[in-house]
Image: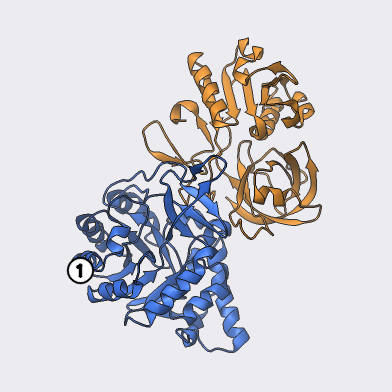
Chain colours: A orange, B blue
Amino acid sequence: MKYLEIFTVESNIALNKTCFLLVLRSPVSLETVAAGQFVSIEVKGEDERILRRPISIHDVDKTNNLLYLVVQRIGKATNRLAEIKKNDEISLVFPLGNGFAIEGEKPLLIGGGVGTAPLYLLAKEFKSRGIVPDILIGARTNEQLFLTNRYSALGNLSISTEDGSVGERGLVTQNSVLKKDFDVIYSCGPTSMMRAVADLAKKRNIKCYLSLENRMACGIGACLCCVNENKEGHNVCVCTDGPVFLSDDIKL
Amino acid sequence: MEDNRLKVNIGSLELKNPVLTASGTFGYGTEYEDFLDLSALGGIVVKGTTGERREGNAYPRLAETPSGMINAVGLQNKGVEYFCKEIYPKIKDINPNVIVNVSGSSIEEYCKVASAINDLETIPAIELNISCPNVKKGGMGFGVDRQMAFEVVSEVRKIYKKHLIVKLTPNVTNIVEIAQSVEKAGANSLSLINTVLAMAVDSEKRKPLLSTITGGLSGPAIKPIALRCVWQVSHNVNIPVIGMGGIRNAADAIEFLLVGAKAVEIGTANFINPKISAEITEGLSDYLNRHGIEKITDIIGLI
C-alpha cells in the first residue's frame, strides 16, 4: 500500500556544504517502510519546478513515526527544500519501490556521496539480526562525508577519499577492506562507481545488489521515464521494479 | 459521491463527469488505486498500445523545464496481444470506462490494434494517437498532414465500430484543417492537445538532456497553447472535443470547458498529485455550487 500524506518537519540540519538531514513526522504508521525504499517529495514555492523529488529513506523511527531523509542540493528544487523549517508541512508519496533483500552473513555496504544515505537503514537491519556489516564510504573529499559516526556505530567503517583527506586515498574499489571475505555486496552511488563495484563483485563471484536513482516523474510506474535495460534487453522501471536490482539482472 | 450535475455525453459515450485521465500518465489505472477511488473518474485513457511490443527510447527520457516536463518515452508497451490477454482481464470491470490509446507506425498497425480492441466488450472507445512526437516512424507524422490524417482515420473507421476519438497534435500550422479532415474521415470526437515538440539542453555539459534530443512538452507551460487549440477547433467542427494540456486544478478544467471542451483529460498533474483527478471532479461540483449553476454542460463553450 502506498500513501499520499502531509508530513510535519521536525528538524532540518545541514550536514555539509551540500547535504542536509530532514526529520519528518508522519501522520500514519511507518510500519511497512523497508530499507532501500524511497519517497517522493513535493517541493512548494518553486513554481518552475513542479515534479516531486525522489529521495531514498535514510532511517525510520517506527515507534515515533519519524522518517529521516538525507538530501543533496543539486538544483532549484533541492535548494528550496533545504530552506524548510521545523513545523513546515510537506507532502510525501511513500513508501515507493522494493527495498534491499537482507541476506548473507558477511555483507559489505558500499556508498558513494549521497548514495550512502539508504545504506544506513540497511546496516541497521543487519545489526538487528546480530550481523556486523562492513561499510565502505567513498567521497571526493572529507567535506562531502556526513554522519560517519552514525555509520561506525552500526558496522566496521572504512572510508576512501579521492584526495586522501580522510581514510584511504583513491576510489572505493581500491580500498584495502576489499581484501576481506564477503558473501554479499550492496551498493548505492554514482553510476560509474556502481559499475566498478559490479565488475569487482562479478570477478570475485559475490552476489551484488545495486540501488539506482534514475530521473523519474511519478515514482509509481506510470510515466515510464526512469527505465533501465535489464539483461533480457527490456526496459524496466527503476521506481517499481527497483530501485534495488541484482547487478547481474541489469545492464548498467 | 456521484454528482448528477456533472454528467456529460461525448457522442455515444456517457460519462458520469467530464474528468478523464490522459494516456501515458495514469498507467492502466491500477497504479493509482492506492490513492483514489477510480470510480470517482469520468474515464481512464490507458497507455498507448501498439501492434508489437516496443521498448521505447533510451534513457534519459525526461527533462524538467519551467512549469513543465519534456518526455521521450516513445510508446513503450508490451503490444496489443499482451494487452488483450494479460491487462484487459484485470481492468475490464473498472468502473468508469477504460479507453485504449491506439498508436502505430503504419496504417496497418493502427488497424491491427483497433481491430483487436474492437473485440473487447467493456472498452467503449479508442483514442487514436496520430500525434506522438517521440517515435521515428508514424505517430505525429500522420497528425501533421491533412491527407495522411484523413487516410488513417478512414481506414480505422472501417474496422472500429465503437466510439472513435482522435488525438491531435498542436505541432501544426493550422490545427482546424487537420481537425476537419479527421471529422470528415469519421471520427466521433477529438482530443487535444498531445505534447508540444520541445527540447532541453544542459549548458554545463553542452549536451541535450534527452537521448532523443527532442521530446514532448507537457504540464502547465502548455496550457495557454492548449486552450487556444481547443477554442479554435471546438468552434469549427461538429463533433465533441476533449481538452487537455497542463490542467492541474478545477479552475483549469473549467477554462477548457468554457472554450468549448465537453470533457477534459488530466495528464502531468497525476505525477505530482496522484489524487488530483478525483480532486478536480470535486472541484467542479464546488464551482457549480459557488456560481449557482445548474449543471456543468451549461458552461461548455460560453467563450
Whether residue B19 is visible: no
Residue A183 locus on image (x, y percent): 57, 17
Q: Nearer the viewer, residue B281 or A227?
A: A227
Quarter of the image with the N terminus of chain B is bottom right
Q: Is residue B188 left or right of residue A200?
A: left
* Quadrant hosting residue A233: top left
Whether residue A214 is visible: yes
> From the viewer's perspective, is residue A64 above or below residue B273?
above
- For label 1, the residue is B154
Write the residue at 58% across / 51% down: A2
> From the viewer's perspective, is residue A217 above or below residue B303?
above
Q: Is residue B159 left or right of residue B263?
A: left
Q: Residues within 10 Å of mark 1 (few under 14, many from 20)?
A: many
Residue A132 locus on image (x, y percent): 70, 20
Q: Is residue B150 left or right of residue A243?
A: left
Q: Nearer the viewer, residue B265 or B6?
A: B265
Q: Chain of mark 1?
A: B
> From the viewer's perspective, is residue B126 above or below residue A179?
below
What's the amino acid at mark 1? Ser
Furthest residue in direction top, as rendered: A179
Residue at disc 1, secondary structure: helix
Residue B161 locus on image (x, y percent): 23, 69
* Quadrant hosting residue A182: top right
